[in-house]
Image: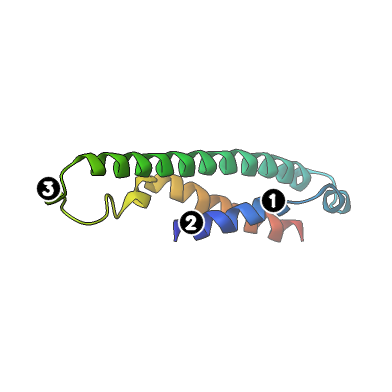
Amino acid sequence: MLTEQLENFRRVSKIGISGGALALLRPGKIHELILNYNGFLEQVDEHTQYLEINVAGFRKLLKRHEKQVPHMFHPSKTPCLGFHKLVTKSSRQIVEITNMLGQIISWAAQ
């Protein structure tokens, strides 16, 4: 679920609002807001990529250490079923709020 949200977020952030679309907008606060939002999208995208890399690395560490523990001491067959929950609730909320903010800005620009 989180991976799907991140992929959707990346698709939206890569599309962004192009310079041609910005030229069609009337100058003012909306134009400035869109520019700030595009910068914010880049920062949130970098943050989510950083989180994904760290969660994947942590999962690999768990797998490696699981092999060092004798099999009879394993509680389950997989090392950490809920590893995706390592991404904090606040990080997921940032992605959701950013998506909502983008929808509001696109509505205001129309």
Q: Which mark is residue 29?
A: none
Image quadrant assignment for residue 39: top right
Across and down, in percent, residue 90 comes to 41, 45
Secondary structure category for the residue under label 1: helix
Taking depth in this image into account, of 86 and 38 the one nearest to the observer is: 86
Residue at point 43% right, 38% down?
A: 54
| Quadrant of the drawing holding the C terminus | bottom right
Give how far apart the Cα atoms at labels 2 and 3 are.
Answer: 31 Å
The answer to whether the residue labelled 2 contacts the one labelled 1, judged by CB atoms less than 8 Å apart, is: no
Q: Residues within 10 Å of mark 1 (few under 14, many from 20)?
A: few
Residue at point 39% right, 46% down?
A: 87
Secondary structure category for the residue under label 2: helix
Give how far apart the Cα atoms at labels 1 and 3 are.
Answer: 46 Å
Residue underneath mark 3: 73
Across and down, in percent, residue 48 comes to 52, 44
Question: Which three-letter amino acid code belongs to the residue tagged 2?
Answer: Thr
Image quadrant assignment for residue 104: bottom right
| Quadrant of the drawing holding the N terminus | bottom left
Residue underneath mark 2: 3
Q: Visible in this render: residue 25?
A: yes
Residue underneath mark 1: 14
Nearer the N terminus, badge 2 or badge 3?
2
